[in-house]
Image: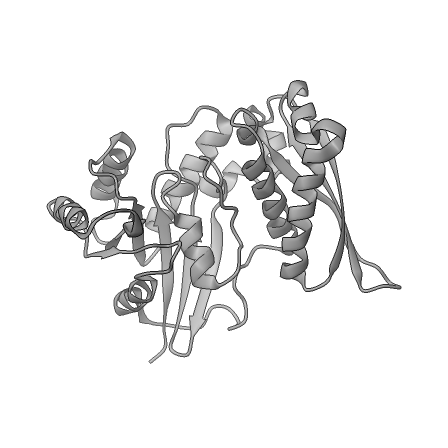
Amino acid sequence: MFKSGFVTIIGRPNVGKSTLLNGVIGEKISAISNKPQTTRNKITFIYTDENSQIIFLDTPGIQKPKNKLGDYMLKTSESTLSEVDVITYIVDCSKKIGRLDSYIIEELKSKNTNTPIILLINKIDEIAKEELFELINMYSNLNIFKEIIPISALKKDGVDLYIETLKSYLKEGPQYYPEDMITDQPEKFIVAEIIREKALRFLDEEVPHGVAVSIEKMRDRSDKDIMDIEANIYIEKESHKGIIIGKNGRMLKKIGTEARREIENLLDTKVNLKMWVKVEKNWREKENQMRRFGYDSKYTK
């Protein structure tokens, strides 16, 4: 019997959602960093084995919106709750349930009483077993989770158990995607995410939230086994332009070098990557610019 179904991954920022899914799929599809708002879109990951296909929806970390982009991200996360067969809620090893997690738990209680919810307690490699047992008891007392599974997304501990547990909640169904397909996102989207991730990783705190990447050109050369990629990195303030470019262009070169290596691994070809830094003031408050960068609120209504 072949099983299939849709699973959303929700949680507050920086609990390891994208790390988990990139590990499950075996490829980096979603940007990963230690900064909030790393994931901005609903990203589809496709896991297929001999008897199942699980379509994961990675969502932005749930937090209080500060601008229209934040509104879009919150709607994106919450819109998936009614679309799936199983909800996966990820928390870290914090000893108390904080404000954002309390909000998410209340949302789960009010909107999804009929959808099974699996809780993943991530980053278990950072705490003692006694503390983990206390966390399991704390969350068990909420009486909303069908399963509670401790994992380390970074080390892939507990991930196989999580996959097998998911299968037990899925019904017999079709194979929605070819077995070698791991995402429905176009290559341009993934390339833009790789560049944005490198910028997030290397830049100062005040810059990353206002960074967007647009791929202007992505074309194979006819005479050589090489792909030419041209990308614009957009920021909101003129003062941030110098930070991204860096002294004598060193920061932009660093971002480009790291991004190019990863893009070449993804596309299995040599890449000639050119990048420009441009200012688009307050783009996170402008719906037309948000759509241009791939954040379209109509998909969350």
Which of the image's four quarters has the N terminus? bottom left
Q: Is residue 66 above or below residue 84?
A: above
* Res 116 seen here: no
Task: Judge left or right: residue 103 versus residue 200.
Answer: left
Quarter of the image where one finds residue 270: bottom right
Task: Judge left or right: residue 291 versus residue 275.
Answer: left
| Rendered location of residue 282, percent (x, y) | 59, 22
- State the residue lying farthest toward the right: 223
| Rendered location of residue 23, percent (x, y) | 44, 59
Q: How are the colours assigned in the image?
A: one colour
Looking at this view, is 211 or 172 the one in front? 211
> Which residue is found at the position 63% from the left and 31% from the top?
289
| Rendered location of residue 38, percent (x, y) | 49, 39
Q: Is residue 295 above or below residue 46?
A: above
Looking at this view, is 146 or 160 the one in front? 160
> Which residue is found at the position 46% from the left and 30% from the top?
70
Which of the image's four quarters has the C terminus? top left
Quarter of the image where one finds residue 290: top right
Q: Is residue 291 above or below residue 3?
A: above
| Rendered location of residue 76, percent (x, y) | 43, 41
Q: Is residue 241 above or below residue 95?
A: above
Task: Judge left or right: residue 193 versus residue 50.
Answer: right
